[in-house]
Amino acid sequence: MEAVDQFFAMGGYARFVWPAFGVAVVVMGGLLAESLLTYRKRQRELKSAEGRRR
Amino acid sequence: MLRLANPNRFMQWSAKLLPGCAIGTAMLLGLGTWLALFVSPADYQQGDAVRIMYVHVPAAWMASFVYAIMALASAVALIWRHPLADIAAQQSAPLGAGFTLLCLVSGSLWGEPMWGTWWVWDARLTSVLVLFFLYLGYIALINAFDDPSRGARAGAILALVGVVNLPIIKFSVDWWNTLHQPASVFRLGTPTIAASMLWPLLIMALGFTLFFVTLLLLRMRSALMAARLRALRLQESQAA
């Protein structure tokens, strides 16, 4: 357990290192989620629009 | 090259390329994060705070790189009026803004323990903040017109004018006094960073780049589908 604690303590810089990686996850994860959701939505819309044509 | 840029062709080859890009991104970012947190050594001066570098530096590189791509696509759109170029530029902008925000926040989190301040109004930090506002201004501008083609044209011109900021960012650390350290990787001569830190950094940077490529392809496909949707709806309303 001590090794785990030591890892998360980041040599006393935990409150700077972890937020930096956290912001990366939030920003890049957010971009990924927004891009994927829009993509799925467009696919659905296009499918139903092309279905109406036939 | 021109044939690959045909929208139908683009939909075909991007569909084939996307799964590989996504898997490659996941692997590189996973490996990079593991190397950054577990394998790479703590710095003899900065201790473990140096690990912020593996987020901050790739984000900073991408902030400028994506802007260069956006400006290049804008130039192609203005000169050859290629519709795919406009879409590429417009879909790059939110990604570039995200990387720039990440660069600014992670830099701030690195500045406080190392410099003793979250922010200074020096040349490097200020020019990157200007880059962030250029992205936001571009996004606002392309959406500000009723006619999307006029918005695209105005945005392309803004993107090209803003290119002047890129060399200012790059050379700000050499031209002016600043707290920010000068370049240690992209410099004349050998990098001034230890190999045990350089490799994790390069892998992370490659992961960020592939992440951008994957999302850009995905977003461009969404934009093309939206255009097709608009055309279909126009036909429907005319037929009714």
Image (cartoon, rainbow, N blue to C red):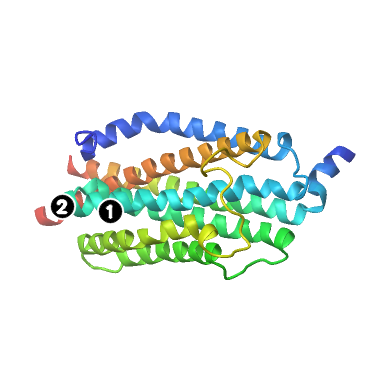
Q: In which quarter of the image is the N terminus of chain B?
A: top left
Q: Nearer the viewer's eye, disc 1 or disc 2?
A: 1
Residue B113, x across and y down, in percent: 74, 59
- Please state the chain letter of the residue tagged with numbered disc 1 in the rendered image: B
- Callout 2: few (<14), some (14-19), or many (20+) C-alpha neighbours within 10 Å? few
Q: Which of marks 1 and 2 is nearer the N terminus?
A: 1
In this rendering, the count of numbered labels is 2
Indicate which disc residue B181 carries.
none
| SS state under label 1 | helix
- Please state the chain letter of the residue tagged with numbered disc 2 in the rendered image: B
User: Observer-nearest residue: B27 or B43?
Assistant: B43
Seen at 73% across and 65% down, the residue is B116
| Left or right of B215 in this view: A48 | left
Residue type at tag 2: Glu
| Left or right of B107 in this view: B235 | left
Residue A4, x across and y down, in percent: 83, 40
Q: What residue is disc 1 on?
A: B74
Seen at 28% across and 31% down, the residue is B12
Q: What residue is disc 2 on?
A: B236
| SS state under label 2 | helix
The reply to whether residue B150 is visible in this rendering is: yes
* Vertical side of B18 occupied by B48: above or below: below
Seen at 27% across and 36% down, the residue is B10
Residue type at tag 1: Ser
- Callout 1: few (<14), some (14-19), or many (20+) C-alpha neighbours within 10 Å? many
- What distance separates the C-alpha of mark 1 from that of mark 2? 32 Å
| Same chain shared by disc 1 and disc 2 | yes
